[in-house]
Amino acid sequence: MEFRIRHERCELHGGVDGKFKKGRNQGFPEMKKTEIIASIIGFLLCLATYWGTLSLPEFATVGAGPAFFPRILAILLGVLSLILFVRALRRKGDSEEEKLERNDPSGQPVVGRMVLAMGVSVLYFLALSTFGFLICTFGYFAFLMLLMQTEKKILRTVIWSAAVTAVTYVGFGMVLRATLPIGSIFR
Protein backbone atom coordinates (compact mmCIF):
# COMPACT_ATOMS: atom_id res chain seq x y z
CA MET A 1 0.00 0.00 0.00
CA GLU A 2 2.77 2.44 0.95
CA PHE A 3 4.66 1.74 -2.29
CA ARG A 4 1.54 2.37 -4.39
CA ILE A 5 0.88 5.72 -2.71
CA ARG A 6 4.51 6.77 -3.03
CA HIS A 7 4.60 5.63 -6.67
CA GLU A 8 1.41 7.53 -7.54
CA ARG A 9 2.79 10.63 -5.84
CA CYS A 10 5.98 10.37 -7.86
CA GLU A 11 4.06 10.05 -11.12
CA LEU A 12 1.86 13.01 -10.18
CA HIS A 13 4.89 15.23 -9.77
CA GLY A 14 6.73 13.95 -12.82
CA GLY A 15 9.23 11.43 -11.59
CA VAL A 16 9.37 7.80 -10.53
CA ASP A 17 12.97 7.84 -9.39
CA GLY A 18 12.17 9.52 -6.07
CA LYS A 19 13.10 13.02 -7.20
CA PHE A 20 10.05 15.23 -7.21
CA LYS A 21 9.69 18.01 -9.72
CA LYS A 22 7.90 21.15 -8.66
CA GLY A 23 4.30 20.01 -9.16
CA ARG A 24 1.08 21.89 -9.52
CA ASN A 25 -0.09 21.23 -5.95
CA GLN A 26 3.24 21.23 -4.13
CA GLY A 27 3.30 23.96 -1.52
CA PHE A 28 -0.46 24.52 -1.85
CA PRO A 29 -2.22 21.22 -0.99
CA GLU A 30 -5.70 20.45 -2.20
CA MET A 31 -7.31 20.56 1.26
CA LYS A 32 -5.73 23.93 1.95
CA LYS A 33 -7.18 25.26 -1.29
CA THR A 34 -10.57 23.71 -0.53
CA GLU A 35 -10.67 25.19 2.97
CA ILE A 36 -9.77 28.65 1.67
CA ILE A 37 -12.50 28.49 -0.98
CA ALA A 38 -15.05 27.19 1.55
CA SER A 39 -14.17 29.94 4.02
CA ILE A 40 -14.56 32.63 1.36
CA ILE A 41 -17.93 31.23 0.28
CA GLY A 42 -19.01 31.03 3.93
CA PHE A 43 -17.99 34.64 4.54
CA LEU A 44 -19.84 35.82 1.42
CA LEU A 45 -22.92 33.93 2.62
CA CYS A 46 -22.49 35.62 6.00
CA LEU A 47 -22.45 39.05 4.36
CA ALA A 48 -25.47 38.25 2.18
CA THR A 49 -27.44 36.96 5.18
CA TYR A 50 -26.61 39.97 7.30
CA TRP A 51 -27.48 42.30 4.43
CA GLY A 52 -30.82 40.47 4.03
CA THR A 53 -31.66 41.04 7.69
CA LEU A 54 -31.35 44.81 7.28
CA SER A 55 -34.74 44.87 5.53
CA LEU A 56 -36.49 43.07 8.42
CA PRO A 57 -38.43 45.27 10.85
CA GLU A 58 -37.06 46.02 14.30
CA PHE A 59 -39.25 46.50 17.35
CA ALA A 60 -38.59 49.60 19.45
CA THR A 61 -40.08 48.18 22.67
CA VAL A 62 -38.64 44.69 22.48
CA GLY A 63 -34.92 44.24 21.78
CA ALA A 64 -35.19 41.03 19.78
CA GLY A 65 -37.16 41.42 16.56
CA PRO A 66 -37.38 39.14 13.53
CA ALA A 67 -33.84 40.09 12.47
CA PHE A 68 -32.19 39.18 15.78
CA PHE A 69 -31.64 35.42 15.34
CA PRO A 70 -30.61 35.53 11.64
CA ARG A 71 -28.09 38.26 12.46
CA ILE A 72 -26.62 36.17 15.28
CA LEU A 73 -26.30 33.21 12.89
CA ALA A 74 -24.75 35.41 10.19
CA ILE A 75 -22.17 36.74 12.64
CA LEU A 76 -21.43 33.20 13.87
CA LEU A 77 -20.97 32.02 10.27
CA GLY A 78 -18.62 34.94 9.61
CA VAL A 79 -16.51 34.17 12.68
CA LEU A 80 -16.32 30.46 11.81
CA SER A 81 -15.41 31.29 8.20
CA LEU A 82 -12.59 33.54 9.38
CA ILE A 83 -11.32 30.83 11.73
CA LEU A 84 -11.35 28.31 8.87
CA PHE A 85 -9.50 30.79 6.62
CA VAL A 86 -6.76 31.44 9.18
CA ARG A 87 -6.45 27.73 9.95
CA ALA A 88 -6.13 26.94 6.24
CA LEU A 89 -3.39 29.53 5.80
CA ARG A 90 -1.44 28.01 8.70
CA ARG A 91 -1.85 24.44 7.37
CA LYS A 92 1.45 22.80 6.45
CA GLY A 93 0.49 19.97 4.14
CA ASP A 94 -1.70 16.92 3.81
CA SER A 95 -0.64 13.56 5.18
CA GLU A 96 -1.14 10.45 3.09
CA GLU A 97 -4.17 9.49 5.20
CA GLU A 98 -5.82 12.87 4.53
CA LYS A 99 -5.22 12.44 0.83
CA LEU A 100 -6.92 9.04 0.87
CA GLU A 101 -9.86 10.38 2.91
CA ARG A 102 -10.76 12.84 0.13
CA ASN A 103 -12.56 10.00 -1.64
CA ASP A 104 -15.57 8.22 -0.22
CA PRO A 105 -15.96 4.41 -0.35
CA SER A 106 -17.38 4.60 -3.88
CA GLY A 107 -14.18 6.29 -5.05
CA GLN A 108 -15.83 9.61 -5.94
CA PRO A 109 -14.16 12.82 -4.77
CA VAL A 110 -15.93 14.25 -1.75
CA VAL A 111 -15.01 17.86 -2.54
CA GLY A 112 -16.86 17.87 -5.87
CA ARG A 113 -19.99 16.52 -4.23
CA MET A 114 -19.76 19.14 -1.48
CA VAL A 115 -19.53 21.94 -4.04
CA LEU A 116 -22.51 20.48 -5.90
CA ALA A 117 -24.49 20.30 -2.63
CA MET A 118 -23.69 23.95 -1.91
CA GLY A 119 -24.83 24.93 -5.39
CA VAL A 120 -28.09 23.02 -4.97
CA SER A 121 -28.60 24.75 -1.60
CA VAL A 122 -28.37 28.15 -3.30
CA LEU A 123 -30.76 26.95 -6.02
CA TYR A 124 -33.18 25.72 -3.31
CA PHE A 125 -33.14 29.14 -1.67
CA LEU A 126 -33.79 30.90 -4.99
CA ALA A 127 -36.57 28.52 -6.04
CA LEU A 128 -38.56 28.77 -2.78
CA SER A 129 -40.44 31.90 -3.80
CA THR A 130 -41.47 30.38 -7.14
CA PHE A 131 -42.25 26.75 -6.31
CA GLY A 132 -42.98 26.94 -2.59
CA PHE A 133 -41.78 25.12 0.49
CA LEU A 134 -43.28 21.67 -0.09
CA ILE A 135 -42.03 21.07 -3.63
CA CYS A 136 -38.60 22.64 -3.11
CA THR A 137 -37.92 20.92 0.21
CA PHE A 138 -38.92 17.51 -1.11
CA GLY A 139 -36.73 17.91 -4.19
CA TYR A 140 -33.85 19.35 -2.17
CA PHE A 141 -33.75 16.49 0.34
CA ALA A 142 -34.21 13.87 -2.37
CA PHE A 143 -31.34 15.28 -4.40
CA LEU A 144 -29.02 15.55 -1.39
CA MET A 145 -29.80 12.01 -0.29
CA LEU A 146 -29.11 10.64 -3.76
CA LEU A 147 -25.93 12.68 -3.97
CA MET A 148 -24.56 11.35 -0.68
CA GLN A 149 -25.58 7.69 -1.05
CA THR A 150 -23.13 5.15 -2.40
CA GLU A 151 -25.99 2.80 -3.31
CA LYS A 152 -28.85 4.64 -4.99
CA LYS A 153 -32.08 3.50 -3.33
CA ILE A 154 -34.88 5.50 -4.92
CA LEU A 155 -37.81 4.26 -2.83
CA ARG A 156 -36.04 4.91 0.48
CA THR A 157 -35.00 8.35 -0.77
CA VAL A 158 -38.58 9.27 -1.75
CA ILE A 159 -40.00 8.05 1.57
CA TRP A 160 -37.43 9.87 3.71
CA SER A 161 -37.68 13.07 1.68
CA ALA A 162 -41.47 13.06 2.01
CA ALA A 163 -41.21 12.34 5.75
CA VAL A 164 -38.72 15.14 6.41
CA THR A 165 -40.80 17.58 4.37
CA ALA A 166 -44.03 16.57 6.13
CA VAL A 167 -42.54 16.74 9.64
CA THR A 168 -40.98 20.12 8.92
CA TYR A 169 -44.23 21.45 7.45
CA VAL A 170 -46.32 20.20 10.39
CA GLY A 171 -43.80 21.45 12.96
CA PHE A 172 -43.24 24.91 11.54
CA GLY A 173 -46.37 25.53 9.46
CA MET A 174 -49.06 24.09 11.72
CA VAL A 175 -47.69 23.86 15.26
CA LEU A 176 -45.55 27.02 15.33
CA ARG A 177 -47.74 28.76 12.74
CA ALA A 178 -44.73 30.06 10.83
CA THR A 179 -45.37 31.42 7.36
CA LEU A 180 -43.82 29.07 4.83
CA PRO A 181 -43.51 30.08 1.15
CA ILE A 182 -46.44 28.89 -0.95
CA GLY A 183 -44.85 29.67 -4.29
CA SER A 184 -45.87 32.17 -6.92
CA ILE A 185 -47.04 29.46 -9.34
CA PHE A 186 -49.78 28.40 -6.88
CA ARG A 187 -51.27 31.82 -6.18
Image: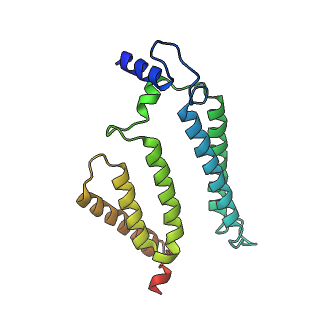
Residue 78 place in picture, x, y as percent = 66, 49
- Residue with the most extreme right position: 60
Quarter location, residue 161:
bottom left
Q: What residue sits 37% from the left and 38% below the top?
A: 104
**80 shown above or below 172:** above
Q: Nearer the viewer, residue 169 or 128?
A: 128
Which residue is found at the position 70% from the left and 71% from the top?
55
Query: Between 163 and 30, which is closer to the camera in this rendering?
Result: 30
* Residue that sits furthest to the bottom in the current view: 187
Count of number-bearing discs: 0
Which residue is depicted at the point 62% across and 34% down?
88
Q: Position of residue 130 (x, y in %)?
A: 50, 77
Q: Residue at x 48, y 71 (%)?
A: 176
For residue 143, side relative to residue 119 (left or right): left
Closest to the observer: 92 or 56? 92
The quadrant of the rendering that contains the N terminus is top left
Rendering quarter of residue 169: bottom left
Image side of residue 75 versus residue 11, left or right: right
Q: Is residue 23 left or right of residue 156?
A: right
Residue 6: tell me if it is visible: yes
Q: How is the image coloured?
A: rainbow
In the rendered image of this protein, does residue 125 appear above or below residue 6?
A: below
Is residue 64 shown to the viewer in this render?
no
Q: Position of residue 44 (x, y in %)?
A: 65, 54
Indicate the position of residue 90 as horizontal and vertical percent values.
65, 29
